[in-house]
């Protein structure tokens, strides 16, 4: 009788043979490696995308999802510093906070020393 069930050693050898053959194909040079690579000479401006050598650059459009795309002017605290009255108020406020800090620190030291 002939043993028709393959043994594990035959399966392992077959598996290794297939791996060796497939890995050898990856080492063969392709036609792409023989073509000289050219650096992109023309840069695409921001807001445009390169569509290839035969098509002109395409303009990108922002998505207007959830109200995006258009920004509304927002009043920021830094934008009011050009106002001299507000700048004077900020300086006065900082001075008050600094004096309060100095008073708190003096009380803290007097409690620690007692």
Image (tube, rainbow, N blue to C red):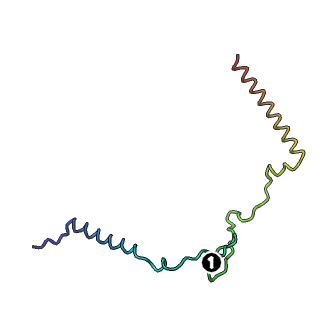
Q: Is residue 29 left or right of residue 13?
A: right
Number of numbered callouts drawn: 1
Question: 66 or 18: which is nearer to us?
Answer: 18
Q: Give the labeled residue for mark 1.
A: 51
Residue positioned most to the top: 114
Q: Residue furthest left?
A: 1
Q: Is residue 83 above or below residue 20?
A: above
For residue 27, side relative to residue 54 (left or right)? left
Residue at (84% x, 50% y) in the render: 80
Rendered-image quadrant of the C terminus = top right
Residue 41, image x, y percentages = 64, 75
Local secondary structure at mark 1: loop
Going by the picture, which residue comes out furthest to the bottom? Answer: 54
Residue 36: x percent and y percent? 53, 78
Determine which quarter of the picture holds residue 55: bottom right
**In this rendering, would 57 be left or right of 16?**
right
Q: At 74% from the left edge and 27% from the top edge, which residue is drawn?
A: 105
Q: Quadrant of residue 112?
A: top right
Above-or-below relation of 49 to 104: below
Q: Residue at x 79, y 52 (%)?
A: 76
Residue depicted at x 79% and y 34%: 97
Q: What quarter of the picture does the N terminus occupy?
A: bottom left
- Around disc 1, counting alpha carbons within 10 Å, would you say few (fewer than 14), some (14 to 19), or many (20 or more)? few
| Residue 98 rendering spot, x and y as whole percentages | 79, 33
């Amino acid at each position: 009788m002939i043993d028709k069930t393959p043994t594990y050693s035959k399966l392992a050898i077959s598996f290794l043979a297939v791996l060796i053959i497939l890995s050898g194909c990856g080492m063969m040079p392709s036609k792409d490696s023989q073509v000289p690579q050219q650096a992109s000479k023309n840069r695409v401006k921001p807001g445009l995308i390169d569509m290839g050598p035969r098509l002109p650059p395409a303009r990108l459009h922002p998505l207007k999802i959830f109200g995006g795309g258009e920004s509304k002017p927002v009043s920021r605290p830094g934008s009011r510093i050009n106002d001299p009255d507000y700048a004077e108020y900020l300086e006065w406020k900082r001075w008050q906070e600094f004096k309060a800090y100095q008073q708190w620190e003096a009380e803290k030291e007097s409690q620690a020393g007692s």
